[in-house]
Image: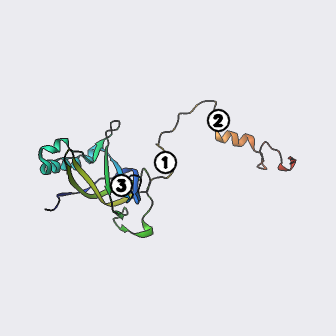
Amino acid sequence: MAQAKLPYQTNKGRAQYPWLTSPDTKYDSDGVYHTSLIVPAEQAKAIIDQVKEFAKDEMGKKAQTAQMPFKSDPVTGEIIFNAKTKFEPKFYDSSGSILVGNKIPKLYRGAILKLGGNFTIYDLGSNHGVKMNLSKVQVIELGDPNQDDGEGFDAVEGGFIAQAVAADTFDDSGDADGEASSNYNF
């Protein structure tokens, strides 16, 4: 008997720890392509309801204790989906055109993506739940390789300011403290 599948396509979300263009081999020597996708709760509700109904239909009472491929962020209330696959997913640009070879961009945390694939059931006795199998990725924005958590620092009065140091320590010649480099004897 064929395994039951529930096709899905997410709304746009922010990628967290995307391993989509090369496999992550940290815990699996064969490699796994995966990402977490953060989606506003109201935009994720329809998929969550479908997954819960799918689990109930396929697992019966076990669905009440099933592991789900998503969780709610306790601070923001956003939904974090966790999708993965052993195989490289297909990539599409924001116009829906397929990307192949060197046209597939490197993706970074904060990339704006849509994910697609199938939900499937696993049941290993006490370890049971729903997997979010990934087969395609739509790239809307690449993310920033230099991105931090987005939180900066508040200003502190009387402290170091980069522009002030640059103006005070260099003269028109570009030498520190206005001294010519020829004044140094080595």
Taking the spot 14% from the left edge, 51% from the top edge, the residue there is: 58
Q: Determine contact: label 2, label 1, CB under 8 Å.
A: no
Sequence-wise, the earlier of marks 3 and 1 is: 3
**Any mark on residue 160, and which?**
2
**Any mark on residue 34, and which?**
3
Q: List x then y, in percent, for residue 136.
A: 32, 61
Q: Nearer the viewer, mark 3 or mark 1?
A: 3
**Disc 2, SS:** loop
Sequence-wise, the earlier of marks 2 and 1 is: 1
Distance (Cα) linking label 2 and label 3: 42 Å
Mark 1: amino acid = Gln
| Residue sitting farthest toward the bottom | 101
**Disc 3, SS:** strand
Q: List x then y, in percent, for residue 154.
A: 53, 33
Q: Nearer the viewer, mark 2 or mark 1?
A: 1
Q: List x then y, in percent, for residue 25.
A: 41, 56
Q: Is residue 147 above or below residue 2?
A: above
Label 3 neighbour load within 10 Å: few <14, some 14-19, many 20+: many
**Disc 1, SS:** loop
Q: Determine contact: label 2, label 3, CB under 8 Å.
A: no
Mark 2: amino acid = Phe
